[in-house]
Amino acid sequence: QVQLVESGGGLVQPGGSLRLSCAASGFIFSGYAMGWFRQTPGKQRQLVAHIGKGGSTDYADSVKGRFTISRDNIKRTVLLQMSSLKPEDTAVYYCNALSSDYEARWDYWGQGTQVTVSS
């Protein structure tokens, strides 16, 4: 049974930093690329960062240079270090494994973690 548990969100001022964590279980973690998605009310989830099985990374243009994704295959976790946060980064953040076309691999989603960037 796939489980994805996101944590680390909160309220932060513009320019601040947060580190999100995702704990995964129920599948062979090291066998999948992983991604962080975010969603705002009324919009579809958007993939903002992903990391391949071998550790290669890529980012949406909106977060490039400010977010860093990493993974620990022993701990079965994927992290998202966010810095220089902007109000437009406000969203609920989710993680999921990725299929070959960078879509979410699992239909199951965790509860997400709310990030609010506001002064």
Image (tube, helix red, strand yellow):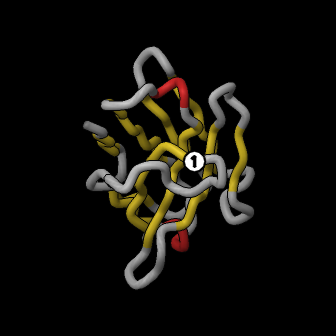
Spot occupied by residue 53 in the image (x, y as percentages of width and height): 63, 29
Q: Nearer the viewer, residue 79 or 29?
A: 29
Residue depicted at 45% across the width and 47% down the height: 96
Spot occupied by residue 114 in the image (x, y as percentages of width and height): 34, 60
Q: Nearer the viewer, residue 30 or 19?
A: 30
Dividing the picture into quarters, in which one does residue 40 lie? bottom left
Spot occupied by residue 49 in the image (x, y as percentages of width and height): 61, 50
**Residue type (three-letter) at the residue carrying disc 1:** Ser
Q: Tell me: residue 88, above or below residue 112.
A: below
- Number of numbered discs visible in the structure rendering: 1
**Would residue 96 appear left or right of 52 to someone viewing this image?**
left
Residue depicted at 35% across the width and 33% down the height: 23
Q: Tell me: residue 103, above or below residue 90.
A: above
Answer yes or no: is residue 34 visible. Answer: yes
Q: Tell me: residue 87, above or below residue 9.
A: below
Instruction: Identify the residue position indicated by label 1 in the image.
Output: 99
